[in-house]
Image (spheres, rainbow, N blue to C red):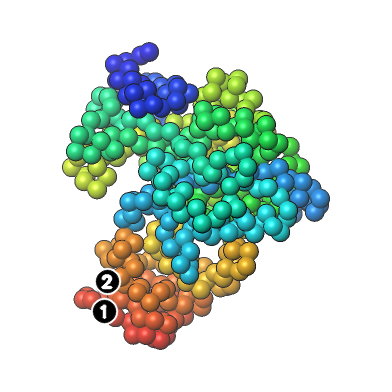
Amino acid sequence: MGSPGLAKAMAKMRDAGVDDVAVQTFAHYYRQLEHGETGMIPEDTIEPVDIPSIHDAEVSDDEAHAAISTTAVIKLNGGLGTSMGMDRAKSLLCVRKGLSFLDVIARQILHMRKTYDVRLPLLLMNSFRTSEDSLAALERYQDLPVEGLPLEFLQNREPRLLADDLTPVEWPKDPELEWCPPGHGDIYTALLDTGLLDLLIEQGYERVFVSNSDNLGAVPDEKVAGWFAKSGAPFAIEAVRRTPSDRKGGHFARRKSDGRLILRETAQTRDEDKVALQDLSRHKYCSTNNIWFDLKALKKVLTERDGILGLPLIRNEKTVDPSDPKTPKVIQIETAMGAAIEVFEGSQLIEVGRDRFVPVKTTNDLLVLRSDVYDIGEDFVLDQVAEVVPFIDLDSDYYKYVANFDERFPEGAPSLRKASSLTVNGDWTFGKGVQVIGAVELDGASAERVAPATVLSD
């Protein structure tokens, strides 16, 4: 079995009822960690990629409809939004007119079913912390469940490991902090060990479209589905051109040793390679985390590998209590869903418009989504009506957490349709009907207020 630390961790997982496939997958990565694997991808082992655009793809209406008819949709819904001060599913956050992320997603799916006359099941991959609240929020949509399929499946959990000896941490003050999710790369393990992979295949579904629940731009598009089905690829990721706001994030590349496409995350980049990572002219594309994969291809590879896909390890260092840097350092063993691109021979990338990538990771993003930069029509799909998506930089001392953010926009977001940027330094509260035009910067040494109907311009 290996080291005492691994034995303790596996025993803890089994005692908690974690499925054996997940336990063995954890053990696979633990052994890599134990032998010094860092998951780093040096710059000199990769080269940039150029990829085709969905706008140039030739897909007939019949091909598109046939593809979407045999597609299932999975939303990654395990996040709590802790970075924004939340303690429940981020997808329950209100984004527009009393609607949460989950409300919009449910209505997008129901509208597409009616429009295209397809089954299009929606499945949430929840964590043990997001399941109950998320399912309760969807109870109002009685037509959402598809007969024979669940509305959710749970991602696995694993022990956090003490950084000094790789043994499972014990934290009696809050035992939940002893556990962590294995990253969204766990989706493949969870589909297998819950039996959902076989169930989807048995019911005639051929492919799955996966995206984050905080990205309302990620609708299961007919043309993209048709392109993926027509390509014959086992796996594909939608990519977008990187912008300055993506500079510190991950990117796609091609591995020199075998020519495989790979996804390099920031946590897999050495310090000496950070300049290359941030070079937008070299590494042009980043992931939307909008992913398509063929169900039978996934089943084949998992069967060949005894249930362990073998994604690259991500060694994530944190503290037991993320809100207290003085608590013991721990390591979380994680994998990224998109890293599976290097596992499947023949994987592809396709460039899509930025309208399919509208993630909300901070309150800066939330302000844009709640503003008039986007319209939401009868199909509940985001329609960018502003010429540009403005750059927002709110003072983290006052706006980082949703509760504080809401206090400072009590009458809703200002109009940002004509804004190019909004930078707020200090503590500002915005009245009703404020409009921002051009590039605006606010500075204040004390609490300030922007009066209702004020026009802020550069």
**Amino acid identity at mark 2:** Gly
Q: Where residue 76 is drawn, which disc sits there? A: none
Three-letter amino acid code of the residue under disc 1: Glu
Task: Locate residue 380 relative to residue 165 in the image: left or right.
Answer: right
Q: In this view, does 164 lie above or below 272?
A: above
Q: Can residue 221 be seen in this view?
A: yes
Q: Is mark 2 on a helix, strand or loop?
A: loop
Q: SS at mark 1?
A: strand
What is the x, y in percent for residue 295? 65, 34
Are the two marked residues, 2 and 1, in contact with CB atoms closer than 8 angstroms? Answer: yes
Left-right relation of 264 to 423: right
Residue 375 image point, x, y percent? 56, 70
Q: Quadrant of residue 206?
A: top right
Local crowd at mark 2 within 10 Å, few (<14), some, or many (≥20)? some
Q: In which quarter of the image is residue 356?
A: bottom right
Residue 142 to residue 209: above or below: below
State which mark lies toward you, 2 or 1.
1
Residue 151 % position (x, y): 54, 44
Of 401 and 394, the residue lying toward us: 401
Place of residue 68 in the rendered image (x, y in percent of width and height, measured from the top left): 71, 48
Residue drawn at x 19%, y 38% as measured from the top left:
173
Q: Which residue is denoted by mark 2 in the rendering?
A: 426
Report, in whole angstroms, how far the alpha carbon at label 2 lies from the one at label 1: 8 Å
The answer to whether 323 appears left or right of 367 in the picture is left
**Circle 1 sits on which residue?**
448
Q: Quadrant of the N terminus?
A: top left
Image point (33%, 54%), residue name: 86
Q: Is residue 51 visible?
A: no
> Residue at (71%, 42%) from the top-left corner?
70
* Label 1 packing within 10 angstroms: few (<14), some (14-19), many (20+): some
